[in-house]
Image: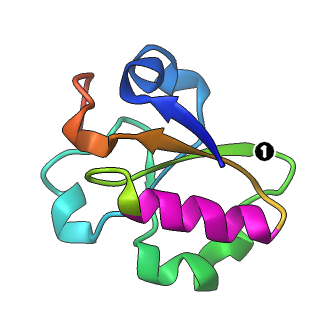
Amino acid sequence: MKTMSAKEVEKQYEDLNIIDVRETDEVAAGKIPGAVNIPLGLIEFRMNELDKSKGYVMVCRSGGRSGQAAQFLEDQGFNVTNMHGGMMNYEGETK
């Protein structure tokens, strides 16, 4: 599985397709601008909303759930990268 640091995401977030797999109450406290919230438990049911021709960066609180989501989507043929360390390491802008 490919990984990307929180610092790399901070510098490039405007050019990335970010999927935040945290629960909606967690995301309410702040998410990366432009990120789409699809809680981990719904990834399997909402993956039809994603485009296999695009790359996605998966994000969660610490990198564990996003790693699970990235592995699942990778197994389904998607181009995904996990943000290592999650939002705990992200120091950029949030909304």
Q: Position of residue 32 (x, y in %)?
A: 34, 37
Q: Nearer the viewer, residue 83 or 54?
A: 83
The single residue placed furthest to the top in the displayed view is: 11
The vertical placement of 36 against 7, above or below, is below
Left or right of 92? Residue 84 is right
Q: Quadrant of residue 44?
A: bottom right
Q: Nearer the viewer, residue 62 or 31?
A: 62
The vertical placement of 1 against 10, above or below, is below
Q: Position of residue 27 (x, y in %)?
A: 24, 57
- Residue located 38% across and 59% down the image: 64
Q: Position of residue 76 (x, y in %)?
A: 79, 71
Element marked by disc 1: loop
Binning the other alpha carbons within 10 Å of mark 1 as few (below 14), some (14 to 19) or many (20 upward) gives: few
User: Residue 74 magenta-drawn?
Assistant: yes
Q: Nearer the viewer, residue 71 or 95?
A: 71
- Please name the predominant secondary structure of the magenta segment in the image: helix
Q: State which region is magenta.
A: 65-76
The vertical placement of 1 against 74, above or below, is above
Left or right of 2? Residue 54 is right
The single residue placed furthest to the left in the displayed view is: 29
The residue beneath circle 1 is 54
Q: Quadrant of residue 7?
A: top left
